[in-house]
Image: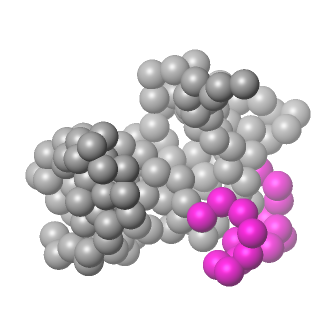
Amino acid sequence: MKIQSLGHVVLKVRDQKRAEQFYNGVLGMPIVARFDRLNMTFFSLGNHHDFAIAAIGDDAPAPVKDGVGLAHVAFKIGDELAVLKSAKTELEAAGIAAVAADHGVSKSLYFSDPDGNQVELYIDQSDSWRRDPQTVAAYTPLEL
């Protein structure tokens, strides 16, 4: 067996409408479909669906930082530092605190969605990982 590519990610949330407002309204991801029976919303980034949310109820427990499960989901937003700076400004205007990081091959913003799920927005900066795959493990705090 050989995996060809990552197909999509489905993230559990408490409230479907609130999560839609965040992922569509704040992050600008286009909604392509809803599956009401399962309280799901599907978003597209160019494929039929690249990302989805599944609402599991308002009393669902918050993600556990040191527990097993998804650590974060990352979305590429461009290749220029100005794009990342603009995203940080937009997040701050929406009341969302973000932490910036330089990974060598990419620069990123990390923040939480309304349910405490971790999200990363990033820009690509280098293809050095093609020559030295270990470079993807770099981390330096970044001031934007």
Between 97 and 78, the one lying in front of the other is 78
Q: Residue at x 85, y 38 (%)?
A: 38
Q: Along the line of sight, which residue is nearer the eye, 93 or 7?
A: 7
Chief secondary structure of the magenta span? loop
Q: Give the left or right position of residue 113, taking residue 122 as reference.
A: right
| Residue 40 rendering spot, x and y as whole percentages | 74, 38
Which x, y percent locates residue 124?
25, 46
Image x and y of residue 26, in percent: 41, 51
Residue 107 visible in the snapshot: no
Quadrant where the N terminus is found in the figure: top right
Instruction: Farthest residue to the front: give it.
Output: 131
Quadrant the C terminus occupies: bottom left
Query: Is residue 143 shown in magenta?
Result: no
Residue ID at (58%, 46%):
20
- Which range is magenta? 55-71
Residue furthest top as drawn: 48
Query: Is 32 situated above or below 54?
Result: above
Q: Is 44 above or below relative to 39? A: above
Asked if residue 1 is positioned above or below residue 19 in the image, the reply reads: above
Query: Is 54 placed left or right of 51 in the picture?
Result: right
Tell me if I can see residue 76 in this picture: yes
- The way the protein has been coloured in the rendering is one colour
Residue at (70, 57) in percent of width and height: 13
